[in-house]
């Protein structure tokens, strides 16, 4: 974890504030567009937020937090109780939503989903790519950074307040893309489903707020053999691999516990994991908060 000081809190839309976290012990860890961090709040909760500032600024991180009426305690604390000057611990950045090289991009943001896409648009424009942002929200007043982005990028940014215009036609947007274009989309589940239906799968990259509801075979107990320490940890059907490892004395970091943030990634050196995450674990890795196995796993622990 990195120690920071909450340097600045600023409203950036109805129900959304921006937090600037200044490094308390020198430069902060580098990051690239699409990265997020875990923010440890003083009420003992940890929440994940996309970095939406300038990657070249090693002195501070910027995130934006929307107030959720059904808050489980994270956004409520940020909006009602967090004050400037507060020391806060922040994880090293993780990136499961990397911006790949391309000559053309379409960025599609829904509400607070603008946060990972804002630095992506800046990077794409700086690289000389053809880049367009389609930004969808209830009203312009409720859309963080909308006016700032329009002022900076002009016609590259198309804002769609749904109260006035409804949603854009994704099928028409897809028809206007070149063959090498990549589409990056972040927003509510309904918008992501529409994007999946409209854009070619090979060029579409999504980041989700919440996991997709899936069905799996009933959980079975299995064993996790920790190769470096020589211990075997039993994992009961009713517990997660993450909990079993933590209870056995292996302090695996965790954040969302839903398979969307990637903080609990571990290395697998033998056996076949049953991947249940929404990120797409790379070969030899798994996210142990949700993923399991039907037989023994050998872990690099």
Image: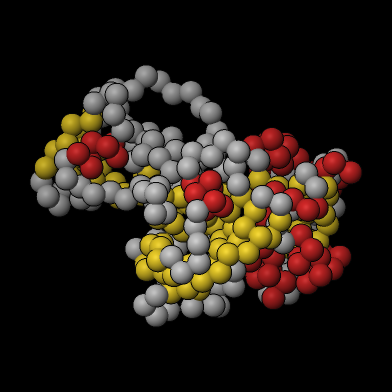
Task: Judge by depth and name the residue closer to the eye, 85 or 36.
Answer: 85
Task: Judge by depth and name the residue closer to the eye, 49 or 24.
Answer: 24
Residue 204 in view of the camera = no
**In the figure, is residue 8 to the left or right of 256?**
right
Examine the image and state in which quarter residue 220 appears: top left
Task: Judge by depth and name the residue closer to the eye, 228 or 150.
Answer: 150
**In the figure, is residue 175 to the left or right of 120?**
right
- Which residue is found at the position 12% from the left and 50% from the top? 229
Give the percent coordinates (x, y) of residue 269: 26, 47
Give the percent coordinates (x, y) of residue 262: 42, 49
- Which residue is found at the position 53% from the left and 46% from the top? 76
Residue 273 in view of the camera = yes
Give the percent coordinates (x, y) of residue 13: 71, 56
Task: Judge by depth and name the residue closer to the eye, 200 or 163.
Answer: 163
Examine the image and state in which quarter residue 272 appears: top left
Identify the coloring: secondary structure
- Which residue is found at the position 54% from the left and 77% from the top? 57
Examine the image and state in which quarter residue 23 appears: bottom left
Number of callouts in the render? 0
Q: Which residue extends farthest top?
A: 218
**In the figure, is residue 33 to the left or right of 225?**
right
The N terminus lies in quadrant: bottom left
Q: Is residue 84 above or below residue 111?
A: below
Q: Which residue extends farthest bottom?
A: 26
Q: Which residue extends farthest right?
A: 165
Give the percent coordinates (x, y) of residue 239: 29, 29
- Which residue is found at the position 17% from the left and 36% from the top? 233
**In the figure, is residue 260 to the left or right of 237?**
right
């Amino acid at each position: 974890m990195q120690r920071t000081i909450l340097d600045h809190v600023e409203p950036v839309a109805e129900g959304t504030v921006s937090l600037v976290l200044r490094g308390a012990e020198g430069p902060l860890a580098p990051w690239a567009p699409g990265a997020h961090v875990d923010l440890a709040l003083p009420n003992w909760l940890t929440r994940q937020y996309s970095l939406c500032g300038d990657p070249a600024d090693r002195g501070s991180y910027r995130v934006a937090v929307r107030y959720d009426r059904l808050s489980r305690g994270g956004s409520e604390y940020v909006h009602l109780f967090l004050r400037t000057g507060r020391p806060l611990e922040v994880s090293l950045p993780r990136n499961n939503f990397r911006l790949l090289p391309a000559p053309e991009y379409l960025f599609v943001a829904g509400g607070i989903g603008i946060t990972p896409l804002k630095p992506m648009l800046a990077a794409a424009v700086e690289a000389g790519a053809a880049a367009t942002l389609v930004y969808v929200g209830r009203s312009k007043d409720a859309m963080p950074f909308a006016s700032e982005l329009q002022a900076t990028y002009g016609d590259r940014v198309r804002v769609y307040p749904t109260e006035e215009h409804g949603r854009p036609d994704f099928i028409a947007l897809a028809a206007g893309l070149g063959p090498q274009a990549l589409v990056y989309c972040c927003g509510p589940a309904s918008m992501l489903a529409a994007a999946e239906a409209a854009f070619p799968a090979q060029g579409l990259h999504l980041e989700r707020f919440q996991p997709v509801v899936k069905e799996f075979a009933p959980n079975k107990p299995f064993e996790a053999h920790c190769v470096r320490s020589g211990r075997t940890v039993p994992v009961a059907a009713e517990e997660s691999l993450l909990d079993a490892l933590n209870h056995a004395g292996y302090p695996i970091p965790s954040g969302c516990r839903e398979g969307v943030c990637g903080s609990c990634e571990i290395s697998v050196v033998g056996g076949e994991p049953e991947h249940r995450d929404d990120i797409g674990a790379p070969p030899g890795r798994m996210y142990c908060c949700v993923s399991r196995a039907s037989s023994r796993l050998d872990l690099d622990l």
